[in-house]
Image: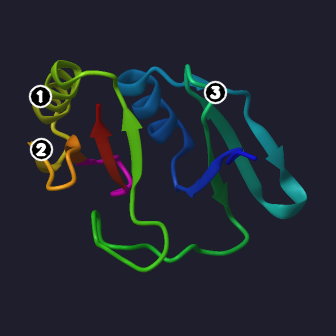
Amino acid sequence: MRIDHVGIWTDDLERLSTFYKNYFGARVGALYENPARQFESRFLEFESGARIEIMKTGAFEPDALQAGRQRMGLAHLAISLGSESRVDELTKRLMDDGHPVVDGPRRTGDGYYESVILDPDGNRIEVTV
């Protein structure tokens, strides 16, 4: 068994797909549209085969949360880069480009080396080894 994908609501498919493409090398899939349901989505696929489905709707308004706010449910998405130097480099690049870095880079008590950043929609992303 494996997790097939994680779904994330957004109000801007292009902004979010561009972010994950530019910083994490995601391949951006074709736009899927269902006008009857006022639904659009794109799959973002990473080199490892992991996928994120980013989704937009006009049928209802998903609850907006304050950027980076901790909540019950999905807390963060962790993306492994393979080395501490890559974590450092990407964290600096994200910070230089104006993306919020919440924490790190640092070594956590359980041994992870990571930074916590926010994507353009305020979702917490752990950038780790």
Would you say 50 lies left or right of 93 here?
Answer: right
What is the basis of the colouring in this image?
rainbow
Residue at position x 17%, y 32% in the image? 91
- Tell me where residue 102 sits by quadrant: bottom left
Dot 2 alpha-carbon crowd within 10 angstroms: few under 14, some 14 to 19, many 20 or more: few
Query: Which of label 3 and label 2 is nearer to you?
Result: 2
**Amino acid type, label 2:** Arg
Which of these two is toward me, 100 or 90?
90
The numbered mark at residue 49 is 3
Residue 129 pos. (x, y %): 29, 31
Real-space Cα separation, disc 1 to disc 3, in angstroms? 26 Å
The numbered mark at residue 92 is 1
Would you say 107 lies left or right of 112 here?
Answer: left
Residue 112 pos. (x, y %): 23, 44
Query: Which of label 1 and label 3 is nearer to you?
Result: 3
Would you say 18 lies left or right of 34 here?
Answer: left
The numbered mark at residue 107 is 2
**Element class at badge 3:** loop
Residue 98 pos. (x, y %): 15, 38
Query: Which of label 2 and label 1 is nearer to you?
Result: 2
**Amino acid type, label 1:** Lys
The numbered mark at residue 40 is none
Badge 1 or badge 3: first in the primary sequence: 3
Real-space Cα separation, disc 2 to disc 1, in angstroms? 16 Å
Dot 1 alpha-carbon crowd within 10 angstroms: few under 14, some 14 to 19, many 20 or more: some
Which of these two is toward me, 7 or 61?
7
Would you say 1 lies left or right of 81 here?
Answer: right
From which residue to which does the magenta span run? 117-123
Residue at far front of view:
110
